[in-house]
Amino acid sequence: MTMVRHILWRSAAIAFVSAAMLFPGAVAHAGSIAERIAGKILLQVERHGEAWYVEPSTLERYHLGRPKDAFAIMSGFGIGIASAELDAYLAGTFPARLSGRILLDVERSGEAYYVSPDDLRGAYLGRPKDALRIMTDYGLGITDADLAQIPRVLGYSEEGRTIAGYDIGSGGYCVLLIAGIHGGKEPGGKGMMDRFVDDLFSGTETVHPDKRALVIPLANPDGYFGRDDKLNANGVNLNRNFRTSEWVTGDADTTTYAGEAPFTERESRVIRDIAATCADGVMVSFHARGNFVNPENSERSTALARWYAENSGYEYYEGWYYHGTATRWFEETVGGPAITVEMTDYTAHDWEMNRDPLRALVTDTLVF
């Protein structure tokens, strides 16, 4: 594994081009870099050549890891193509619409080819060692700061939709921001998180060196795209599915159903696993509606909630204390303060209210 990373790191160093050189005149906001390098293999020049694939249709990045992992991930994106059509393209170049895609010959046992965005030629992808060759030959070096602008696939929902987020900065103090855990019932939180990410990447301020911002704009994509209540595809309220003290399953077929056991749902496990990478920090979970900020049980959570209310214009409220929530789990397990922001309405993004406290949480020295 060390040798593989050494090879990839050397290739990244040779191939590296900064975003400013690669995309002259580009506006450095979320999505701009991803749109311009869709389908490419990216190698982190500041992380010894960690490899990523930017899926062309979603513009989300997938960690490729070891050659066998890279082979499995890339093969999983295969699009079927007839042998005659494939042979014609292999004799010359592929059309631009197939740039960065993985093609599977449906008539020849699924032989796979990666279409390089650089020259629109096909590279054979038959075994894990071919994945390593593709990463080495076609990998483009990228800095951590530029890579952070491309949403990272953190996991999958119960119906297989991606749960993507942003991991920005490398400090030890995490600011974990979550929205959309209640899916279609509360769509405004996703809009507000998207605005925050755009603001962070297009502004002059950056994440403080001692901090790391983890942003998950849509924690329940199945609910967002397929339901109009608070539940996920299995009918579970994800914000009751975390392992906390006094956890109970609740009543099935109601909006408070917590599942058969804690962490039965893929979505809650995604949040658990990303939060587990934090040794210290805060969690802010966005919901609707209520126009207030509610703390968890600790003095640190209370201090954070009072500060957030004062700087946002929301009311401060202490009346809610539920089992199984993401914030309660974070406080009990990670040990950091956690609050729930109940936005003014289900579809409202409340950007003007949240802008200043969110900026301060990630760019200032402020800690709780």
Image: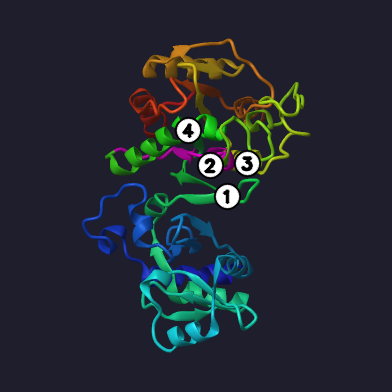
Name the element at disc 2. Answer: helix
* Residue 318 place in picture, x, y as percent: 56, 11
* Residue 178 place in picture, x, y as percent: 52, 34
* Residue 37 place in picture, x, y as percent: 37, 62
The answer to whether residue 217 is magenta is yes
* Residue 326 place in picture, x, y as percent: 62, 30
- Closer to the chain start, of discs 4 and 3, is 4
Indicate which disc residue 225 carries: 2
Q: Amino acid at mark 1?
A: Arg
Q: Amino acid at mark 2?
A: Phe
Indicate which disc residue 129 carries: none
Whether residue 96 is visible: yes
Indicate which disc residue 267 carries: 3
Give the magenta part as a residue range. Answer: 205-225
- Closer to the chain start, of discs 2 and 4, is 4
- Closer to the chain start, of discs 4 and 1, is 1
Residue identifier under label 4: 187
Most extreme residue toward the left is 25
Residue identifier under label 1: 161
